[in-house]
Image (spheres, rainbow, N blue to C red):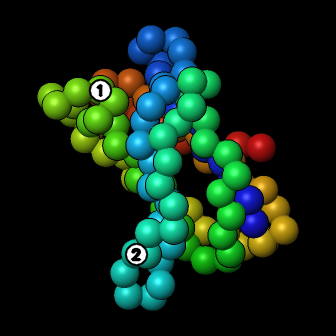
Amino acid sequence: MSLSTHVLDAARGRPAAGVVVRLERHDGQGWDLLAEARTDDDGRIRGWRTGPGTHRLVFDTGGYLGPDAFYPEAVVTFRVGDPDEHYHVPLLLSPFAFSTYRGS
């Protein structure tokens, strides 16, 4: 299964470059760190691979928005069912809100 993400700064109307993102997988008792990366100049991380199960992306929004960020992190938990599919999980970010969806 391949996974990508894209962080868009809705307040500035541009990609959010430099956001640290962790990919974690639930092992039945806790979370295992699988990968960590920063978004590129286009706000993207590509090429992560993992298998079926429950995963989460942990976005360090405080590191991007600053120390007074209302949301110091955004956590998106999702389930991977088909290991042959590509999963794209975008994050739309602003200082007092965030949203996500299953992209393509």
Tag 1 residue: 65
Quarter of the image for residue 31 reads bottom left
The answer to whether 93 appears left or right of 90 in the picture is left
Quadrant of the image for the N terminus? bottom right
Residue lying at the far top in this picture: please name it.
12
Farthest left residue?
Answer: 68
Q: In this view, does 73 lie above or below 65?
A: below
Relative side of 85 to 16, left or right: right
Question: In this picture, is 89 found above or below 56?
Answer: above
Whole-Å distance between the Cαs marked 2 and 1? 25 Å
> Type of residue at label 1?
Leu
The answer to whether any part of residue 41 appears in the image is yes
Give x and y (percent) for residue 102: 66, 48
Query: Hey, which quadrant is residue 93 in on the image?
Result: top left
- Secondary-structure class at tag 2: strand
Location of residue 66 in the rendering, given as x and y in whole percent from the top left corner: 23, 27
Evaluate if marks 2 and 1 touch, with contact meaning CB atoms under 8 Å apart. no
Q: In this view, does 100 lie to the left or right of 3?
A: left
Q: Using the rendered image of the protein, determine whether residue 8 is visible from the camera's viewpoint.
A: no
Q: How crowded is mark 1: few (under 14 residues within 10 Å), some or many (20 or more)?
A: some
For mark 1, give the secondary structure.
helix
Residue occupying the point 67% across, 45% down: 46
**Front-most of residues 100 and 61:** 61
Where is residue 58? Give x, y as percent.
41, 53
Extreme residue toward the bottom, this view: 28
Q: Could you tell me which residue is drawn at 49 percent across and 26 percent down?
A: 17
Q: Which residue is drawn at 70% across and 52% down?
A: 47
Three-letter residue code for mark 2: Trp
Q: Looking at the rendering, in which quadrant would you find the C terminus?
A: top right
Find disc 2 in the rendering and name its residue. Answer: 31
Location of residue 64 with respect to 84 vertically, above or below: above
- Name the N-terminal-most of marks 2 and 1: 2
